[in-house]
Amino acid sequence: MLALPSQTASPPARRSPGAIGDQVPGEERTGLLALILALLCVGETRIEGLAGSHDVLATAEACRKLGAAIERNGDAGWRIHGVGVGGLLSPEGSLDFGGSLAGAVLMMGVIASHGVTATLDGNAALRTCPIMPALEALTRMGAEIVTSAEGARMPLTLRGAVDPVPILWRVPDSGASSPVIPDLVAMAVLLAGLNAPGETAVIAPRTAAEEAVRLLRLFGADVATSPEDGGRRIVLQGRPTLRTAAVTLPADIPPPSC
């Protein structure tokens, strides 16, 4: 059984009898991140407690198009056989994320450091979401925007870097009223860093990417954090061999939107 690293001195969360793995925060976004990290493992990852909402199903289908084999196990169980870091397949057709800003931005991070080209799209609401903050960082790592809608919005065709460049990226704090984009940018950069050589780092607001740090460690990535400038520096060592995991999520809450 894999244990999540402790983030505070508080007692560990209670687990129901027979729960798989250690519990992580129950946001649907955390489940989307777990699906994507499972894509980047070789072997079977199990996720429990992730209901099949439209956003989850859309992100799972994107993982399939990039090479994962995915099976549903009841209403909220998943078995994912991934392709490993560096093993993405070129997808046939566009990756449609419905209304999931989190799914789309996180997958941009993965694609950015793999030598594949993919078109990401979504519903009318998602097409209005600002994604340039993520694209600014990912293009610094070598990704290329092939085509996009006006204002660098979806539908977007992104060409991942064959030789991605690790970066140090400072994520601005947008304030407590809208933490979503900074959080997603930090997570996208870390996901891109998985297939980049050396160290990829972000300096982000103190609580940004908290679930990403915990899940990356659960899947075997080398991630270090330290305080910096009122926030924290998150440093990831690139090109790990991620290990499969068993993850149990508490009840989902609605995912963030733009």
Image (spheres, rainbow, N blue to C red):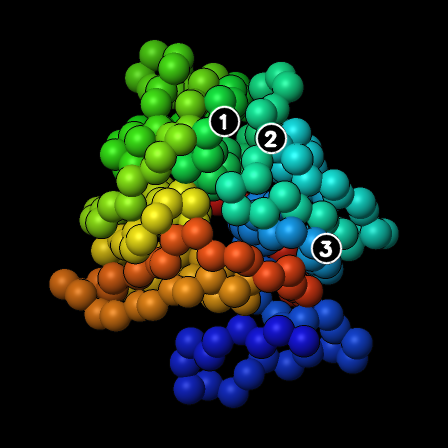
Give the residue type at disc 2.
Answer: Leu
Judge from the rendering whether residue 20 lies leftward or rightward of residue 163; answer left or right: right
Q: Quick one: 251 or 96, which is closer to the camera? A: 96
Kind of element beneath mark 1: loop
The image position of residue 222, as x and y in percent, is 41, 65
Give the residue type at disc 1.
Answer: Val
Q: Quick one: 108 or 98, which is closer to the camera? A: 108
Judge from the rendering whether residue 188 lies leftward or rightward of residue 256; answer left or right: left
Q: CA distance from mark 2 to mark 1?
A: 7 Å
Res. 134 in view? no
Q: Do tag 2 and tag 1 residues touch (Cβ < 8 Å)?
A: yes
Question: Residue 116: which disc?
Answer: 1
Residue at 47% x, 62% y: name it. 221
Q: Residues within 10 Å of mark 1 (few under 14, many from 20)?
A: some
Question: Residue 147: which disc?
Answer: none
Kind of element beneath mark 2: loop
Q: Quadrant of residue 199?
A: bottom left
Give the residue type at disc 3.
Answer: Glu
Q: Is residue 229 above or below residue 192?
A: below
Q: CA distance from mark 3 to mark 2?
A: 18 Å
Which residue is denoted by mark 3 in the rendering? 44
The image position of residue 239, as x and y in percent, is 44, 52
Res. 196 in view? yes
Question: Residue 89: which disc?
Answer: 2
